[in-house]
Amino acid sequence: MTIELNGTSAEVLNEEPLVIKNLKNWHHIHSYGGLGKFFHGLRKRKLLATRCTNAECQEKRLWLPPRCQCPDCWHDMEWVEAPTVATIYTHSTVLYPGAPFRASIPCPLISVEIEGVCTKMMSYLKEGKPEIGMPVRAVFNTEALTNTILDLAWVPQ
Amino acid sequence: MIRFGPKNLRIPKFERPVYMVAGGLTDYRKRYPEKSSSELCMEAFRMAVEENDLKVTAEEVRRSVNWCVYSQFADHFGDQLLAASKIHDYLGFDPLGNIEVKTGGATGGSSVLAAAQAVASGYASCVPVVGWERMDEVSTKVGNSYIASAACKDFESELGWMYASYYALMARRYQYENKVPRETLARIACKNHEYACYSPYSQNPGKYTIEDVLNNDMVSDPLSFLECCVMSVGAAVLILADEETAYSLCDHPVRITAICGGTHTLRTADRRPMPILLLPNETEETYRDYFKGQRTEWPGFSSFLASRMAAYLAYNMAGIKDPIEDFDLLETHDAFTISDVQTYEDIGLRPYGRGREFIESGDAYFEGRLPTNLSGGLIGTMHAVGATGIWQLVELMWQLQGKWDKFHADPERWARYGKKKPEEFRSLQVPNAKRACAISHAGTGSHVTVTVLEKA
């Protein structure tokens, strides 16, 4: 007999041992929460970082990637515009990316040092050959937005 | 700056001693369609209870168990949430309690830590730790993206979907600050691939020359394929017990004198400078001239604070004064060659900036002062992630029990996995080994456990 089932039958990849192919095709809904402000900032060619507003906080660092709350005192932070120039702290060129990668390869990943920022954000170099210590400036993808961190890249100054 | 409060660095202690009594493995393969994850765990479990010279029957072991810990890195890979429940049932342990532990690449080490805590506190007296990973349901490219889901999804994963690249950023900076010759890194790859040739369990054995490694294709510069760990399918089991149970099950249990964990930010980007946390074999004087040239801060991208934290706690807990002198064997989490050199420094085998000397001096070899990754490591033998930290400890336990040959040299064991024992076989049993150390490591150093084992 045939049992009527929805969808196509699974493809058999191997009979002995039996291996079948399950199809998965759906979307994940990625919520940025309070961090959405950072991605809105990229659309306006701004790098938005956060700083703690608690007068008692011992650190009051400028964070980029931003955090909505301070890891040192757990108080809310305020949004501040960070400089859009930086120097390359380290780099590596991706040649064999994982499946969903959207940028073109080879893709030079870079970590950047920005004055006043306590972190070394990961990003990528849009043009040129990366060198440690190289001064770079931020460029923004403002058309055909991905609304991901790929909308921020850097080029040599 | 990271500032510690007075209790933050409290040295952990066990309320009562914890022992390892038996271990079991499967072989490790890139693809393993012949056996389900449950069957792989069963196979490793049966090896543990049937082949470790226990004084009791397998049935008596079953009747001794009162708590279980399960170790699997990624539900994505197995495409089965609550897989631990299936495996717990498959092994016949229902309705005993269990817990599943997840800390990325360090899942195995953290699972043993959880089991040791259960035994040490008196919560349980006999605890199997069962680890596995099934990484063959997707292509390597999708597998890499699954692993990269263990980077920050908001600010990192989209940048390559490739964990090797995130390590490579650290590697490049380490090279800039410390200028390790590529040849030295290649020696680590050659060593671990070679030791894997003497393991019937290994997935990626091979005798390579330094030239082979130097001429190998880059995954993400400066890391080549032969310098990166494998993606595996397989399982590992370790049974822990309190003193009374341990000696009722076997004559020569191995004692866990310390197992401690440290962490650091998942995003490497967020690592802030702090003063170097000193190990017992270091003083302020050790680092009087450290910050010069390209080195401006610690831990930066050159060092794993999580490894240093875990080593600091474990060494103080176990009374380790000098790791090179005090340990007879070491298993590191050699996910990549450079991260291995970084780890040598983090765990005090050499001061920061001088990790290369551990390889260059010959210390790390079978003949050296502290033979390291005689198992073949993650580069040569396996990285079935949830099993990895457990497999390292099983290998060390067998070494300390003098059973390395039993579990590696018997041609029948090779035949069990469809392999032929190589003609140029070497025994890697370290004679009279008394104390050993294992490092289990996740993320770009997000979680690390350091375990100290001692022949009882």
Image: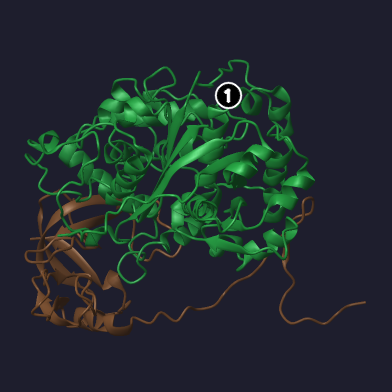
State the image quarter where residue A2 is shown. Answer: bottom right
Image coords of residue B4 (percent x, y): 20, 59
Per the image, the residue denoted by label 1 is B402
Chain containing the residue with disc 1: B
Q: Residue at x 78, y 81 (%)?
A: A5
Image coords of residue B423 (percent x, y): 63, 16
Point out the image quarter for the N terminus of chain B: bottom left
Q: Residue at x 23, y 33 (%)?
A: B281
The residue lying furthest to the right in this view is A1
Q: Residue at x 54, y 53 (%)?
A: B115
Query: Along the horizontal axis of the image, is B209 left or right of B128?
Result: left
Q: Residue at x 70, y 55 (%)?
A: B38
* Residue closest to the eye, B205 or B54: B54
* Residue closest to the eye, B130 or A107: B130
Image coords of residue A48 (percent x, y): 16, 77
Query: Along the horizontal axis of the image, is B358 left or right of B213?
Result: left
Chain B: its colour in the image is: green
From where the camera sits, is residue B91 visible? yes
From where the camera sits, is residue B206 visible? no
Q: Of the residues shown, which amino acid type is indicated by label 1?
A: Gly
- The residue carrying pointer 1 sits among few (fewer than 14), some (14 to 19) or many (20 or more) residues within 10 Å by Cα, namely some
Element type where label 1 sits in the image:
loop
State the image quarter where residue A150 is shown. Answer: bottom left
Judging by colour alone, the chain drawn in brown in this rendered image is A
Image coords of residue B219 (percent x, y): 38, 45
